[in-house]
Amino acid sequence: MSISSADDRVTIVDVASRAGVAVSTASKALNGRGQLRAETRQRVIAAAEELGFQANVFARSLLSGRSYSVGLLTSDRVGRFSVPVLSGVEDALGAGKILVYLCDARGDSIREQHYVRTLLTRKTDGIIVTAERTDPRPPVSVERPLPVVYAYSQSERPEDISVIPDDRQGATLVTRHLVESGRRRIGHITGPGWFAIHERAAGFRSVLDEAGLEIAGGGVLAGDWSEAWGRQAADILLRRDPRLDAIVCGTDQIARGVMETLRDHGRRVPDDVALTGFDNWETLVTGCRVPLTSVDFGLPELGRYAAGLLLAAMDGQAEPGVHRLPCRLVVRESTGPVAPS
């Protein structure tokens, strides 16, 4: 038999019975073989977990030709985005007892290619590529057919599989929240011209256009990702439009700087000016003077989704193209209705 149990009292027959499937189906699910429905495969894996059934990885590898390992290749030098994505990937793949190799390319293309060759040498079953930004990038070069999924990253090649947050939808959510709370003079302070920034600006403008509103201060203010830029930009915005009553910020870091300048100008958050961020970085949003409303990408969920796409591709059921996952708005004390005059 291709699979054995660490506990001889629990067999694959027990797993099949618990999952309500045939023994052959349970074997395919646990060996990563066969074109099974995702629901069936997950039910078998869950049954194995409940019963404490452990697969004999060496036996499975010999039989299937798979290594039951994947590589997570990252160029996110800080780990702000890749670590949550990794946790989601491991949640999804760990249930099937698939090892994840973390390879830090540090934004260096030569280092990245070295890791790709190393993963190929180890006969990994697939690669997940992640980054610190979602800009389209050249595809990873592999020397043999191997499933590759880009997570919080996207390939320039349309036939590749990419998963990114829907930044435009996230900006739409937060801007609509401000408009519905009665805000009418809304500014936008953001970072450099990355793909995500253009998407967020488009979502921001679309809601203002629907509401018949102009961008406060005459246009979007773009700078770098820092609290210092947030402080500087808020000062500019207040000079351009003293009646400003809300600001959408491109990141939580920028929003923290904006909040400091608003306080220096005697503007209360949220009574006078509502303030929002992007990223929902816990240490930043809860550490502000006023806890910050922010857009959450759901990075662990994105990692789980990417891992599911990789498993499907490994099973011959690739779903090419860019998959955009919806963001969610986390409302905190920094937003609220306009204070009565």
Image (cartoon, rainbow, N blue to C red):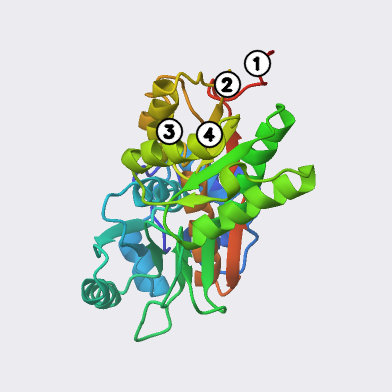
Label 3 vs 1, first from the N-terminus = 3
Q: Look at the picture and state if 250 lies above or below 25.
A: above
Query: Disc 3 versus disc 4: distance between alpha carbons?
Result: 10 Å
Q: Please report the residue visible at 43 percent of the width from the left and 83 percent of the height from the top.
A: 145
Q: In the rendered image, which residue does mark 4 sit on?
A: 276
Residue 339: which numbered mark, if any? 1
Side (left or right) of 308 relative to 107: right
Q: Residues within 10 Å of mark 4 (few under 14, many from 20)?
A: many
Task: Give the camera-side residue of 176 and 234.
Answer: 234
Residue farthest toward the top in the current orientation of the protein: 340
Query: Disc 3 versus disc 2: distance between alpha carbons?
Result: 13 Å
Q: In the rendered image, which residue does mark 3 sit on?
A: 258
Q: Residues within 10 Å of mark 2 (few under 14, many from 20)?
A: many
Q: Nearer the viewer, mark 1 or mark 4?
A: 1
Snapshot quadrant of residue 323: bottom right
Look at the image and tell me in which quarter the C terminus lies.
top right
Q: Please report the residue visible at 53 percent of the width from the left and 24 percent of the height from the top.
A: 334
Q: Residues within 10 Å of mark 3 (few under 14, many from 20)?
A: many
Query: Disc 1 versus disc 4: distance between alpha carbons?
Result: 17 Å
Residue 272: which numbered mark, if any? 2
Query: Disc 4 versus disc 2: distance between alpha carbons?
Result: 14 Å
Q: Nearer the viewer, mark 3 or mark 4?
A: 3
Task: Give the camera-side residue of 42 and 310.
Answer: 310
Label 1 vs 4, first from the N-terminus = 4
Q: Please report the residue visible at 56 percent of the width from the left and 21 percent of the height from the top.
A: 270
Q: Amino acid at mark 4?
A: Thr
Mark 4 residue element: strand
Look at the image and tell me in which quarter the N terminus lies.
bottom left
Query: Disc 1 versus disc 2: distance between alpha carbons?
Result: 7 Å
Q: Are marks 1 and 2 in contact (CB under 8 Å)?
A: yes
Label 1 vs 2, first from the N-terminus = 2
User: Residue 173's x, y, as percent?
Assistant: 66, 41
